Image: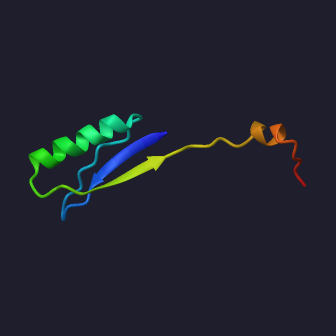
Amino acid sequence: MSREAFCVAADCRATSGGVERQEEVDAWCLDHAERHPGHDRFRRVVTEYRLIGEARTDRGTSAN
């Protein structure tokens, strides 16, 4: 799972980058807001990956 925050202030393209721990994203948001007055809103994205393949046979289903 990957977490990332994006500053949504006008003309700001800053991002935390993808990290695993939510605490790292929160720390980045606080640091960014402190360094840039008015940059106090963020969009947070959580990306979860799924691998499909062998797991399908584990459910007892068959392909038609």
Q: Based on the displayed image, in which of its 4 quarters is residue 18 positioned?
A: top left
Measuring from the top left, give residue 5's x and y in whole percent.
32, 49
Horizontal relation, residue 40 to residue 54: left or right: left
Measuring from the top left, give residue 7's x and y in whole percent.
25, 55
Measuring from the top left, give residue 24's x and y in whole percent.
31, 35
Q: How many marks?
A: 0
At x 87% / y 46%, what residue is drawn?
A: 61
Quarter of the image where the C terminus is located: bottom right
User: In the displayed image of the protein, which residue is found farthest to the bottom?
Assistant: 10
Colour approach in the figure: rainbow
Horizontal relation, residue 16 to residue 64: left or right: left
Vertical comparison of 5 with 22: above or below: below
At x 31% / y 41%, what residue is drawn?
A: 25
Measuring from the top left, give residue 22's x and y in whole percent.
37, 38
At x 24% / y 57%, what residue is drawn?
A: 41
